[in-house]
Image: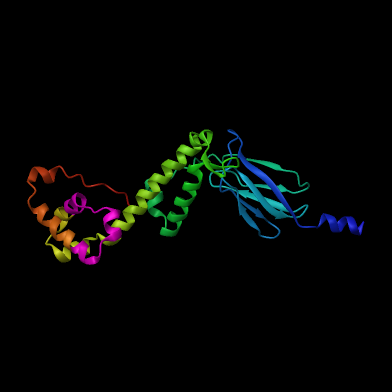
Amino acid sequence: MAHSGSVIQQDTTLTGYVLELESGEPLPSVEIKNLATGALVKSRTDGQFSIPVKRNQRLQFEYPGYRTDTLVVVEFDIKRVYLTSDGSTIQIDEVQIQAMTDSRLAAEIKRAEEEGQFTETSQQRGGVRVSPSRWFSKEGRQARLRHKRLLAEQERRKIDARFTPEIITSLTPLEGEDLELYMTKYRPTVDFLSTASDADLRLYIMDTYAAFKKLTPEQRADIKVPQRENP
């Protein structure tokens, strides 16, 4: 009996797949945690995972937008774990995005990239190929849309960090509505700011301010200042 118990308590690696219950599609980046040891892994793009676990220990499966589930390990055959939606769609609106910290925003971008690509390894060709069924799935489209919106917010923050009212008013007499119109019309791109020095930015502001002064009242009226909600 002692020998049998020793075998039962051996460390063993459990392998399985995490799938969405309704569609049967693999769920990438699901966090699988051994509640006894704290060991943590994430499912791959094809939903597969492998984690060290002992018999009778519990694994927790956690994924945003889905009910957290647990599995008691009693056998070590390949497991298929199905997660069900918690009823809250994984949608991120503009206010939620704006309220994120920079580190949370970066983490959400990385997760959306992983979920939206839906790639799988080709054993025959030794490379990576796109899985059409996953690429065109509802989850894939939603992830890519989230990725686009999250990237747009990240770019906005990079621009706002340098193209500020303070630096513009230090170089020009602009204020109030004119300042808003100027900042909307001549908002620089991330590509420009990624290589521009402070001197380059000051020169850009002076040049575009000169162009702004030449705008007719009609041209100024055509500038649409974006309306943003406060987080």
Q: In the image, is residue 36 above or below residue 86?
A: below
Q: Position of residue 11 (x, y in %)?
A: 76, 57
Q: Does residue 134 appear left or right of residue 175 in this picture?
A: right
Instruction: Give the residue at x 43% y 54%.
Output: 105
Q: Position of residue 164 (x, y in %)?
A: 24, 61
Task: Judge whether residue 211 can be spotted in this image.
Answer: yes
Question: Can you name the residue that lies furthest to the right here?
Answer: 1
Instruction: Give the residue at x 15% y 58%.
Output: 175
Q: Is residue 143 magenta?
A: no
Question: Can you name the residue that lies furthest to the front here?
Answer: 125
Q: Does residue 80 appear left or right of residue 140 in this picture?
A: right
Instruction: Give the residue at x 8% y 53%.
Output: 213
Q: Is residue 184 magenta?
A: yes
Magenta part of the protein: which range? 180-202
Instruction: Give the residue at x 33% y 53%.
Output: 155
Task: Judge whether residue 231 can be spotted in this image.
Answer: no
Q: Position of residue 89 (x, y in %)?
A: 49, 40
